[in-house]
Amino acid sequence: MQLLSTAPTLDAIRDCVGRFYCGQSMTLIPAGEGKWSIQSTYDGVTVEGVHVVKKRNRYRFESTNS
């Protein structure tokens, strides 16, 4: 896993994800306990290879590719 961004709140990490994708509107979809997948709000496509996880009271935007 490669850390791409971290934030103290879910709203803040959502903003970080949007900035990572050059201002595109993205939605976080619950994918289990403390885990979210990322979906484009424009076309509804789920972004592969990244996710958001909650770890020790922080939200982490991570790449799942090695």
Image (cartoon, rainbow, N blue to C red):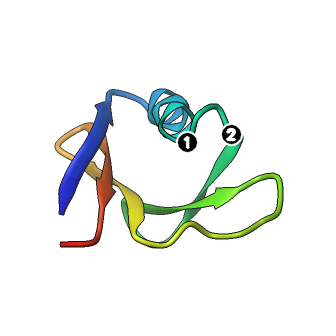
Position of residue 51 relative to residue 58, above or below, is below
Name the residue located 64 percent from the left edge and 31 percent from the top edge. Answer: 23
Q: Are marks 1 and 2 in contact (CB under 8 Å)?
A: yes
Q: Residue 62, how many percent across, how many down?
A: 30, 54
What percent of the width, then of the height, locates residue 21? 55, 42
- The residue shown at (40%, 70%) is 49
Secondary structure at numbered mark 1: loop
Q: Is residue 22 left or right of residue 52?
A: right
Give neighbour class at mark 1: few <14, some 14-19, many 20+ (Cα, 10 Å): few
Q: Quadrant of residue 1?
A: bottom left
Instruction: Tell me residue 12's x, y (percent).
Output: 47, 27
- Is 11 or 43 nearer to us in this picture? 43
Q: Which residue is mark 1?
A: 21
Q: Which residue is mark 2?
A: 24
Vertical relation: 62 (above or below) 23: below
Q: Residue furthest front?
A: 22
Residue 47, position in %: x, y?
Answer: 56, 66
Q: Amino acid at mark 1?
A: Tyr
Which part of the image, by quadrant, shows the C terminus? Answer: bottom left
Question: What amino acid type is highlighted by mark number 2?
Answer: Gln
Instruction: Give the vertical position of 59 relative to 16 (above or below).
Output: below
**Label 1 – label 2 distance at C-alpha:** 6 Å
Q: Is residue 28 above or below residue 57?
A: below
* Left or right placement of residue 7 versus residue 29 in this view: left
